[in-house]
Every structure is written in C-alpha cells, then in structure tokens.
Image (cartoon, rainbow, N blue to C red):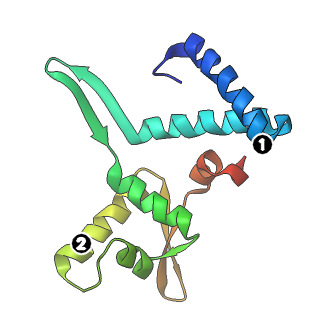
Amino acid sequence: MRQCGPTRGRIYAEKLAKELARLIGPRYIHQALKFYAVRLAFEDEIVSRWLTDTGYQVDVRWREYTALYWALRYRPCPYWLLRLMLGVSGSHPASTRTVAEITEAGVSVGWIAKQYNSGQLYIVASPRIIKRVAWEGR
C-alpha cells in the first residue's frame, strides 16, 4: 500500500475486508489481507518507478517474471515446455538464446533455479518466492 500511504491503506483494507468477509467468510480475512499485502509488495519488486527531470522512469523485470510465472504454473517446468510456452519451437540460435536469457534473468534475481533430473533440465521457483506469492505458502 506504499502508493497511497498507510492511512489510506487502512481505509482501503477495511473496505476490502468487508467484501472479502462476504465472499470467503470472516474466518480467513486476516490471512487473505496478509497474503494480498505480501503479494503487492512483491509486485513492487517487478515494476520500479522513480521520478527524473523528464518524468517517470519505469523499469519492468518482465524476463524474470516470465520465467517465474512458468515455473510457478508448472511445478517444476521442464525447459522444453518453457520453450514451447514462449513460442520457440525450432532450434534457431537466436530463439534458443532468448529463452536462455529469460531463464538466466530469473536465476540472477533468485526467483527461480535450474535443476537437472535424469538428464532433463527443469525450471523451479525459489522456495522463498513460493512462500511469498503462493496462497498455500502462507
């Protein structure tokens, strides 16, 4: 709730809590609000904004997030499936290099890891990230 400040954040949390209580029941409100707060904080890591003399500068970690998305979607994600999901079907060096760059970007920020199992490469989400962004990780 960094964008709106703590006071407005509390107001929004109260309004959100009422609607969530109606949808999921009052028993899980605290857990749900905590989940959304952590999730929003993580999304703040994906998109960085800062003010410059000419306006806002925005940096989006789209490569890192793409690798994380597929690693979370298919736990674990075989490398061949990642290539397929990214639309890389052939063995063209530029396309294969792009998939490798996306994977390395995710590894470099610690969101994913590469694992070999029976000679096959898999992309897996970091346990730290799973705990932060997955509902069952709470």
The residue lying toward the viewer, choosing from 20 and 5, is: 20
Number of numbered discs overlaid on the protein picture: 2
Residue extending farthest to the top is 7
The three-letter amino acid code for the residue at tag 1 is Ile
**Frontmost residue, 96 versus 109:** 96
What secondary structure is marked by label 2?
A: helix
Residue 46 place in picture, x, y as percent:
41, 42
Q: Bin the neighbour count of mark 2 within 10 Å (Cα to Cα): few under 14, some 14-19, many 20 and up.
A: few
Under circle 1, the secondary element is: helix
Residue 79 placement: quadrant: bottom left
Asked whether the residues under the numbered discs 2 and 1 touch, taking CB atoms below 8 Å apart as contact, a structural biologist would say no
What residue is disc 2 on?
Answer: 97
State the image quarter where residue 108 is shown. Answer: bottom left
Q: Position of residue 3 (x, y in %)?
A: 45, 21
Identify the residue at image location x=57%, y=40%. 39
Nearer to me, 7 or 100: 7
Left or right of residue 33, residue 47 in this image: left
Which residue is disc 1 drawn over?
24
Q: Position of residue 40 (x, y in %)?
A: 53, 36
Can you say whether 108 is above or below 13 in the image?
below
N-terminal of the two: label 2 or label 1?
Answer: 1
Q: CA distance from mark 2 to mark 1?
A: 44 Å
Which residue does the image show at 86% across and 37% down from the upper left?
27
Percent across and percent down for residue 102 are 33, 62
Q: In the displayed structure, would residue 11 be above or below residue 120?
A: above
Q: Residue furthest right?
A: 27
Q: Please state which amino acid type lies under the numbered disc 2.
A: Arg
